[in-house]
Each structure stands twice: as structure tokens, then as C-alpha cells.
Amino acid sequence: MSLTKEAIQLITDTALEATGKALPTFTPTAVLPEGAKVLDLEKYQAFRSRFRGTFSTHSLADFSAYVLDRAGASARGFIDQDQMSCTLLFNLGDTSAPGHADDRAVLKLKATAGYTAAQQIAGNRLAQKDLSDWIEDWHQYLTPVDDAGNPIPVAKAIAAVRTITVKATSESETTVGDTSASRSAMDQIEARSKETLPTALLFNVIPFEGLTEQQINLRISVITSGPVPVLKLRWVGEEVQREAIAEEFKAVLEAKIGTAAKLALGAFDTK
């Protein structure tokens, strides 16, 4: 007597139900009917089979405290200096005993309001009122200076920005000879202010929580090509200063958690 496919499946399912076949895995699993599917029974336990999860924070202090409390021998951290972030894997393991790499802590530093303001304004074309308002908003962190580097009171710097006038002068010269004649013309445009116009704004700001204070040099230039003067702030040595901030981030992490986990520059893909 031949058995149908449905009958064979019913016999198999009945046998599996009767024996309650368990699989020799670390997380309890069992083979069930309906195509012999594997079911993860962890959710039915009183506790999880292993600790896992992701702790995310913008706080360098809280990240360091968490890592020091949790880190073990296999903990590895990967620092991304461009993103000012660090991912620490507590159960990465090694080549002989690789871990699941699903227990981790992630730090992503958040730029302070002052550092964000400096990044947003640098390189933009600004009207007089826009720049004077910005100086007024951040006056407690700013030191306007003149050509010689001497400080200028903030109130006078604001007044100087608000009272810029553009003066245009024209000069021509004509030379006549027996057989030739030449003429040259020169136009000169100069921006002046009733007050001493600062040449730069020194912006003292902590870029990220947990790092040291930086002084950003924002050099002022006046563009006189249009009907009204336009001002522009150039961040002097921006790339060099950003690299220095990233290097400090790495040094601070090594000082705080270097004893608890091995750190490396770069990113690690767990796939």
C-alpha cells in the first residue's frame, strides 16, 4: 500500500510532536511540524540566553562610564574621526572564537551650539545687519581684533559693521605725443566705517562636549562689487583645526577607555 504525500507529512509531524525534538544549540530551539521549521524559544524563557543590545549616546562621559563598567577581554572599539564617533563591540571575540557582535555601545559626539554657529556662518555672504546681529548673539564668546591684533570692544565692532560706507573714486591720465596719444583710467572702491572695522573675530568655543576650548579665527572681508556692501567670514586654517579636534577626540577616548578596550581608527562591518 502506497502512502500519499499528505499522509507521510502527517506521520512526520506526529513523530516530531511526540518526541519534542530539541536541537543542540546554545539558544534553546526545537523542530516543529509544518515543514520542520526551527523555532527560537528564547522569548519563552525567564531570561535571555545572552546579554545584547546597543547603547547610544552623545555624552562622552556617559559612554566612557558604560564602557568601563561593561568591557571585557574581547571588547574592541572603532573610531571614526570624520564623524566624531566611536562604536565599541563587547562580544566581537576573535578568529578562533568569533562572537555575535550584537552587544555594543555607540558614541556620536554632538557639536555644541557655538561650534555649529561658527560652521554655519563661515563662508556665507552676509548683509551688514545679519553680521551685526550674529556678533550681538555670540558676543560673550567673541573678541573682535584690528589689523595689529588689538582687541576692539564688541559694541564698537557692532557699530562699525552697521555703519560701513562705500567710497568710489575715479582717476584718469592722458599722455599726448607728436605721433601718438594714450589714456589710462583707474577706479578705486574703498569700504570705510565711522568706527574701527575689525579685521577678524576670534571665536572661543568648545566644539564638542568633553573636548577642550578652541579659538576659531574668522577673518572679515568686505565685498563692494554690488550696490550695498556684503561681508564674508573666512575660517582661517579650518581643515587643520578640524584635524586637530579629531586627533584630540581620539586621544581623549584612549585616555578614558584605552585600558578597558582595544581601540582602532576606522569602521568594522559585522556582516
Image (spheres, rainbow, N blue to C red):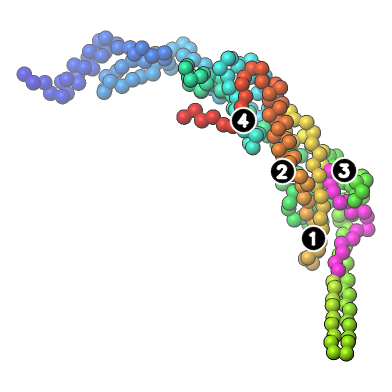
Q: Which amino acid does label 3 sit on?
A: Thr
Q: Earlier in the sequence, mark 1 or mark 4?
A: 1
* Mark 3 burial class by Cα count in 10 Å: few <14, some 14-19, many 20+: many
Q: Which residue lies furthest to the front in this view?
A: 179
| Predominant secondary structure, magenta span | strand
Task: Give the alpha-carbon distance from disc 1 to disc 4, as whole Å.
Answer: 42 Å
Q: Mark 3 points at which residue?
A: 143
Task: Write down the region rendered in magenta.
Answer: 188-202
Label at residue 265: 4
* Quarter residue 75 falls in: top right
| Circle 1 residues within 10 Å: few <14, some 14–19, many ≥20 | some
Nearest to viewer (mark 2 / mark 3): 2
Task: State the CA–CA distance, disc 3 to disc 1.
Answer: 22 Å
Q: Where is residue 89 in the image (x, y as percent from the top left)?
A: 56, 23
Q: Nearer the viewer, residue 110 or 155?
A: 110
The residue sitting at the top extreme is 19
103 over 190 or under it: above or below = above
Res. 153 mark: none
For disc 1, the marked residue is 223
Instruction: Decide whether residue 224 is among the magenta residues.
Output: no
Front-most of residues 66 and 255: 255
